[in-house]
Image (cartoon, rainbow, N blue to C red):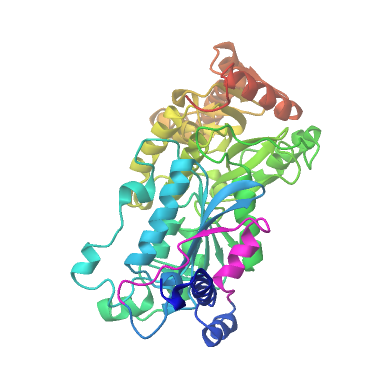
């Protein structure tokens, strides 16, 4: 060994290379990055993880195509850490250098991280902030040869358990970063961020459309179509949202969901009888009902801005994580459109995959109908949702609070989708159609004939009599008598009844996981 190849010299060389990798884009680039309102990627990682737990891999990676510009880590930081004491894998795009663009080496690093996390069964957190593919690194034949294997990118190749994925969109996120976000079970965006397949710089020469980042994929756009599930005002708030989301889920789908200390609900369950008005057309916020069922401080909305007539949220009841699905009467009276059905299907899949019991709260007038609903694909959305609910293996408990009509009832876990238990309040109304609409539809010719023969007053009297008969058939008593319901319960008993129903629905499985 030559004199300059001593171990001390080699260690000094290693340390110099490590220090250069930690410089990211360098002082000037980092200053510009901060001036844009964004934190450097390594500070983002520190905000997310438990202090002192960082275990990095691939720090010394470099681009396949080298230029005069030094690109530490090929513009991505990958490693493992603990988050609230649990293992996670972290991919953080370094947008302080070459705009965080993707090239073969960075893709290999990300794939390596994903493969290890999936194989060993712990969640993946994606910190997105990148302007798509890097030129010339992905030009021509190189694009087809990119080391992207969708088998390993999306799921374990050995058929092992699935792991939760959560993404924070912290800047303009296109191409690879957008793909990452599309795989995540939860996506939180900064108000200043954007998310789309490609960015404005690609769209304008391709289509002539000139757009800002916000116009293309800002939070308002991304939340409305389900590309993101929540918005944050700061990077610290975004990291807190990811930690909160993952706290409801097991590290992988083979494990039970983690329990927490039980808390009383924020609203006394005894108040439920007063929260919900008896008038079928009177509006109220279903979140007030949920606040009297779930543990205080545990409600975590999921995609509130998408398909707003149905609420999907994570929560805890007596410390146990659950998924709550409820119609929202203050949005289109709770009628379900294609967006609501698609959102619900994704949420059912999340809950069933990660072993969270599903609670359905019914106050639904039905599905949206008409040409607009059909053009948005409501029929196919309804069929896919009904099938996904039917095949879910976690406990499924339904409570009919007020009205449950037509396909809307089935879309919220009605009998044909095999709920473990189905209850109703005394205020419940059930049927294929609301009484007023049903009488007008079914008995229109009979009423018209009476009107022609005996006048408007006689027709109105007949319609009223038919409506009373319809309303009687819609009440929960005959449903309970024929075991179409498992029980009729007082509103104030709802939380306690759900606790027992979930316990018995799990049965005596060795662990509370789906078969």
Region rendered in magenta: 38-65
- Report which quarter residue 19 is drawn in: bottom right
- Most common SS among magenta residues: loop
- Residue 337: in sight, yes or no? no
Q: Quadrant of residue 400?
A: top right
Residue 110 in sight in this render: yes
Picture coordinates of residue 487, whole percent (x, y): 64, 18
Q: Is residue 38 above or below residue 46?
A: below
**In-front residue for pair 228/23:** 23
Asked if the stretch drawn in magenta spans residue 60, the answer is yes
Does 364 appear above or below 136? above
| Residue 510, image x, y percentages | 57, 20
Please give the name of the residue rendered at 42% of the width and 34% of the height, measured from the top-left corner: 388
In the rendered view, does 281 fall on the left or right side of 132? right
- Which of 385 and 423 lies nearest the eye of the viewer? 385
Does residue 502 belong to the magenta stretch?
no
Viewer-nearest residue: 418 or 277: 418
Q: Is residue 402 left or right of residue 74?
A: right
Q: Position of residue 191 (x, y in %)?
A: 57, 70
Count all numbered tags in the image, as a single digit: 0
| Extreme residue toward the left, this view | 141
Image quadrant containing the N terminus: bottom left
Residue situated furthest bottom in the rendering: 28
Q: Nearer the viewer, residue 507 or 218?
A: 507
Q: Residue at x 32, y 66 (%)?
A: 104
Residue 11 in picture, x, y percent from top left: 52, 70
Q: Residue at x 52, y 25 (%)?
A: 466
């Amino acid at each position: 060994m030559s004199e300059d190849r001593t171990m001390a010299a080699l260690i000094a060389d290693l340390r110099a290379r490590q220090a250069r990798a930690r410089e990211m884009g360098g002082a000037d680039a980092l200053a510009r990055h901060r001036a844009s309102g964004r934190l450097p990627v390594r500070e983002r990682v520190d905000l997310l993880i438990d202090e002192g737990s960082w275990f990095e891999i691939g720090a010394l990676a470099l681009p396949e195509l080298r230029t005069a510009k030094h690109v530490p880590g090929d513009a991505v930081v990958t490693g493992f850490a603990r988050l609230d004491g649990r293992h996670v894998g972290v991919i953080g795009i370094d947008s302080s250098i070459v705009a965080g663009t993707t090239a073969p080496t960075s893709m290999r690093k990300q794939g390596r991280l994903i493969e290890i996390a999936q194989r060993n069964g712990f969640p993946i957190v994606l910190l997105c902030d990148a302007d798509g593919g890097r030129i010339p690194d992905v030009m021509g034949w190189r694009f087809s040869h990119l080391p992207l294997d969708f088998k390993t990118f999306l799921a374990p190749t050995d058929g092992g358990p699935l792991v939760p994925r959560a993404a924070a969109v912290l800047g303009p996120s296109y191409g690879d970063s957008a793909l990452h976000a599309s795989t995540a079970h939860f996506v939180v965006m900064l108000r200043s961020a954007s998310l789309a397949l490609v960015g404005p710089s690609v769209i304008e020469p391709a289509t002539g459309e000139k757009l800002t980042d916000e116009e293309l994929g800002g939070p308002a756009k991304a939340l409305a179509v389900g590309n993101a599930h929540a918005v944050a005002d700061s990077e610290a708030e975004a990291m807190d949202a990811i930690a909160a989301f993952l706290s409801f889920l097991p590290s992988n789908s083979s494990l039970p969901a983690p329990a927490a200390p039980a808390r009383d609900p924020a609203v006394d369950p005894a108040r439920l009888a007063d929260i919900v008005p008896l008038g079928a057309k009177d509006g109220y916020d279903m979140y007030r009902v949920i606040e009297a069922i779930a543990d205080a401080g545990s409600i975590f909305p999921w995609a509130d801005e998408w398909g707003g007539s149905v609420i999907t949220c994570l929560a805890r009841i007596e410390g146990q994580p659950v998924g709550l699905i409820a119609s929202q009467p203050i949005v289109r009276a709770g009628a379900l459109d294609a967006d609501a059905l698609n959102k619900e299907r994704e949420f059912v899949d999340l809950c069933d995959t990660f072993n969270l019991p599903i609670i359905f709260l019914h106050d639904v007038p039905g599905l949206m109908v008409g040409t607009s609903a059909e053009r948005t694909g409501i029929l196919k959305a309804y069929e896919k949702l009904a099938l996904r609910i039917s095949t879910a293996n976690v406990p499924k408990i339904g409570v009919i609070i007020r009205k449950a009509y037509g396909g809307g009832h089935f879309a919220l876990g009605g009998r044909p989708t095999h709920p473990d238990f189905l209850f109703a309040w005394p205020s419940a109304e059930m049927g294929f159609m609301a009484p007023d609409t049903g009488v007008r539809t079914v008995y229109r010719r009979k009423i018209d004939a009476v009107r022609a023969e005996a006048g408007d007053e006689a027709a109105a009297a007949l319609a009223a009599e038919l409506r009373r008969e319809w309303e009687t058939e819609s009440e929960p008593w005959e449903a309970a008598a024929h075991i179409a319901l498992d029980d009729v319960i007082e509103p104030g008993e709802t939380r306690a009844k759900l606790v027992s129903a979930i316990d018995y629905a799990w049965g005596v499985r060795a662990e509370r996981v789906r078969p």
